[in-house]
Amino acid sequence: AKDPALYASVDPAAGSLPALLQGKFASGLADGEPLAVAVNGRIASITRAFTPGTRSARVLAMIPSGAFRAGRNLVELFELVSASGQARLQPVGGVR
C-alpha cells in the first residue's frame, strides 16, 4: 500500500488486504539492494530496491495475507547488510 494508514485497521475477513507494499526512498539505496519487509515483527517478504531511470530508489513487495492480523499492523522495511561475514537487518528510513 502507498498509504501507511491502511495498516492501522486491517480486517482479514474483508476480502481486501493492503498486500502490495509500494514506496520510494528519500536516501539513496543502490539498484538491486536486498530488502526485507517485516509485519508485526516477523519477516514476511524479501524484495530488492529498484531505480526506474534516474529516479530515486523504490520498493515493491507482496505481503502474504497470513502475515496480517485483525486491527493495527506494524509494517517495517529493512536493508539486508553484511558485516564481518554475518548478515543483519538495518532499518530503512525515509520511505514514503
Image: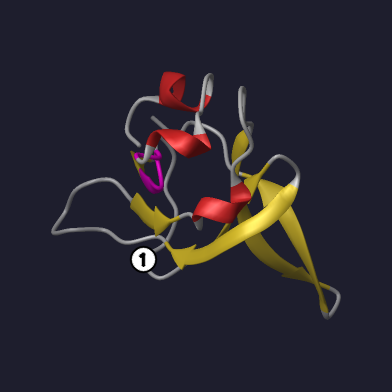
Please tell me whether residue 22 belongs to the stretch shown in magenta: no
Residue at left offset 59%, top offset 54%:
66
Residue at the location (26% across, 58% down)?
Answer: 51
* Quadrant in which residue 39 is drawn: top right
Visible residue check, residue 34: no
Residue 67 locus on image (x, y percent): 61, 50
Q: Amino acid at mark 1?
A: Asp
Q: Is residue 25 left or right of residue 64?
A: left
Instruction: Determine if the magenta segment contains residue 19.
Output: yes
Residue 46 in the image: state x and y as whole percent.
54, 66
Q: Count of labels shown?
A: 1
How is the rendered protein coloured?
secondary structure
Residue 76 placement (x, y as % from top left): 61, 40
- Give the quarter of the figure containing the N terminus: top left
The secondary structure making up most of the magenta span is loop
Q: Position of residue 89 (x, y in %)?
A: 73, 56
* Location of the C terminus (image quadrant): top left
Residue 79, placed above or below residue 12:
below
Q: Identify the residue at horizontal 36%, vertical 41% (top origin).
A: 15
Q: For the point 28% across and 45% down, which residue is it?
A: 56
The kind of secondary structure element at disc 1 is loop
Report crowding for label 1: few under 14, some 14 to 19, many 20 or more residues within 10 A (C-alpha).
some
Residue 42 shows in the view: yes
Residue identified by numbered label 1? 31
Name of the residue lying farthest toward the front: 13
In the rendered view, does 65 fall on the left or right side of 78?
A: left
Q: Is residue 68 above or below residue 62?
A: above
6 and 54: which one is in front?
Answer: 6
Q: Residue furthest left?
A: 53
Closer to the camera in the image, 65 or 55: 65
Q: Which residues are magenta?
A: 16-21
